[in-house]
Amino acid sequence: MANTRDVLVAGGGIAGLAVALAVRRAAPMARVAVADPAFADPAFADPALASAGPTQGRRTLRAVAVAAGSRRFLDALGAWEPVAAAAQPMVEMVITDSREADAPRPVFLDFDGEAEPGEPFAHMVFQDDLRAAVLRAATENGVELVPDRVSGFRREGGAALAIEAGGTASRARLLVAADGGRSRLREAAGIATVGWDYPQSGIVATLSHEIPHDGRATQHFLPGGPLAILPMRAADGSERRFSLVWSVPHVEAARLLALAPADFIAALEARIGFAYGALTLEDRPAAYPLRLVLPRALVAERFALLGDAARTIHPLAGQGLNLGLRDAAALAEAVAEPLGLGLDPADPSVLDAYARARRFDAVLMAGATDGLNRLFSNDSLPARVLRDVGLGLVDRVPALKRLFIRDASGLSGAVPDRFRR
Amino acid sequence: MPQPTAPTDYGPATRVDGADVARYDALGDAWWDPKGAMAPLHRLNPTRLRYIRDLIVRHFAVGADAPLPLAGLSILDIGSGGGLLSEPLARLGGRVTGIDPAPNNVAVAARHAAEAGVAVDYRATTAETLAEAGDLFDVVLALEVVEHVPDPDAFVMTACGLVRPGGLFVLSTLNRTAKSFALAIVGAEYVLRWLPRGTHDWNQFRTPDEIATPVRLAGLKLLDRTGMVFDPLRNSWGLSRDTDVNYLVSAKRPA
C-alpha cells in the first residue's frame, strides 16, 4: 500500500503536534501526520484567525508553564518565537507553608530562579497561543493534518491500521497515542494503568490585579491542597494578571464554584492576602478532579504513548506539558536515526530506547508531586515540622536550591542532546 | 513458512553455491522478523546502512539537507535476500535493483516491498547474467555474500564490472583470522547460537587483501577499508578500525 505513513500521531495537543514537527525536522524524508477532530475547525486549520477578538483571539485564557528546557526545545523547532512577545518570564518562585488561619503566609522558600545566567527558569504562555504556534510550524514543515479522531487500531502487515471515527482507516508504521489522560488508544493497545483519584479538584481561573507581580510565582501549601499563583501578561502587556491553580477537596470546590465572583475573590483573599491589590476575575473558574495515572508500559508493537496518555500527574508543579514535550523530544530523537537510514521507526529496539529514556523521568515526577501533595495537604503538627525543616534546609543550601531550580526548569535528567542546545 | 522449493537450476557451479541458496530460500517471512532467525543481520543493518549512505552522500556530493539523499541513483544489491538492505535504500530515494538466485527470497522481498509501498526491482538472477546483458549501476553492493560463492575472485570481478564509470562498489564480508574463527564460527554459531551451524565455512572467508586484488584487476580504485565490531554491552554494532572479523571495503571506478 502506497499510503503508509511513517508516523501517525493521534491527538493534536501541544505535545502531539510537537513530536510530529520534531520528527519532520530531524528526518525530512519521513511521512508524518497528526489526527485530531479539532483540525476541522477553521480557527485551527488557519492559525491566523486566532489573532483578534475580545480575548485577543484566544478561545480561553488557560495558561501553561513552559520550563527553560521546554522553551529551548520549542525554540529549536521554530515554535517559540511567535509566542515569545506575550510570554511572561517567571523569575522567582516563592513557596509558603502555613495553617489556614495564618495570614500573611511566612515565606519559606524563595527561588531566585535562572536556569542559566540570563535565562528565566520558566515562562507562562497562553495555551492557545502555543498550540497555534506549534501547529503553524508543523504545517510549514510538512506535517499532514487529518481532521478526524483515531478511535481504534489494529496491526496489519507490518503497520498499524488506525481506524478513524469517520469510518476511514489509514496505515502508519508507528502510531503515537497523544490522546490525553483517558487515552482510548492506550486501552485499545491493552496497556493497563495504575493510579488513583485524589480527594481534590483543581480550580483554574484567570485574574487581573492592581499591583504588578514582577514575574513572581507563588505556591501556598494549604492543608486542603496547594494553591499556585502563576504570573501572566495582561492584555495591555503589563504584569497585572495571574493564573490561579487551586487544589481543594471536591466538596469545597463545588462550594467555591457556586459563589458569586465577589465572594470567590473574598475566599481567595482569605488564603493569599492582599499583596496584589484589588482582584478581578477574567474568566469563569472551572474545576477538574485530580488523578494520578501511570501506564504499566509506554510502548507496544507499532505503538507508543506520549504526553498525558503516558502519565497523568498531580498538576502541582505544572509539569504535565513539560513532561509531554520531553516525551516528544525523546521519541523524535529515537525514531530520527532509523528514519534517516530508511529503517523501521517502530523497530522494537527503537521503541525500547524511547521507553527507557522516559520511564524514569515520568515515575520520578509523579512520585515527587504525589509525595509533596500528600506531605503538604495535611495539618498535623509532625508533618508541618517536617516540611518546614525540609524546605528551610533547601533554602539554606545553595547547591540544593540550584538543583531544585534546574529540575523545575527541565534541564536535568534525560533531555536528548539534539534539543539541549 | 514456505516449503523449501524443488531443486532449481542455479546456473553454472561457479556462480552460486546451491546448498547455501536452498538454506536462505527456506527462510521465507523469517527474513523480516527482527527477533527471528535473521536477528543478527537486523542488528548489523543500521551500521552498514549508515556506512553506505554516508559514503554515497560524500562521493556523489549530495546536499546535506536533501530529504531523499539517494534520489536519482541506480543501486544494485547483489544477494538481496529478503530485502533488508534494498528496501531501506529505496526509502532513501535510490532506484534499487535487488538480485538473488533464490526465487523464494525474491518473492518474500517483493511482497514485503509491495506491502510497505516501496518500489524495488527484485529479480531472481545473478550478477553474471546482468553482466552478460551489459547492465551498469551507479552503486553496486555485495554485502555478506562473497563468503557464500564458490569462486570469490571471479564473483568480485564480475560485480565490479557492473559499476558505471564514476560509480561506487561496496563489499562486506568476514576476514579469515584466528579471531574470526573464534567469534564468527565458534562464538556466533556454537556458543551464542545466533546463526545455524554451518552458516559459514571459515575456509571460504577472504582477507581484505584477497578482496582488494580482484577489485583492482577489475579497474577500480580502493577508497576505504573499515571494520564492523559488535559491542556486547550495548548489544549493537559499530564501525571500527579493527577489520579482523567483519569488514567493509569500498572502491570507485574512475570516471
Image (cartoon, coloured by chain):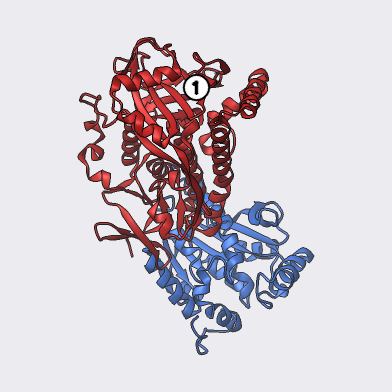
Chain colours: A red, B blue
Can you name the residue that lies furthest to the bottom here? B6
Asked whether A194 or B166 is in front, the reply is A194
**Regarding mark 1 in the picture, which secondary structure is present there?**
loop
Asked whether A177 or A29 is in front, the reply is A177
Residue B45 occupies which quadrant of the picture? bottom right
Residue assigned mark 1 = A100
Q: Is residue A56 left or right of residue A372?
A: left
Relative to A205, residue A273 above or below: above
Asked whether A269 or B119 is in front, the reply is A269
Q: Amino acid at mark 1?
A: Glu
Residue A266 occupies which quadrant of the picture? top left
Residue A408, image x, y percentages:
54, 29
> Label 1 marks which chain's residue?
A
Residue B190, image x, y percentages:
73, 73
Q: Is residue B120 left or right of residue A58?
A: right
Residue A414, image x, y percentages:
58, 39
Q: In the image, what residue occupies the spot 42% across and 57% down?
A: A187
Residue A144, image x, y percentages:
31, 47
Q: Residues within 10 Å of mark 1 (few under 14, many from 20)?
A: some
Q: Is residue A10 left or right of residue B192?
A: left
Q: In the image, what residue occupies the spot 40% across and 49% down?
A: A182
State whether residue A101 appears in this view: yes
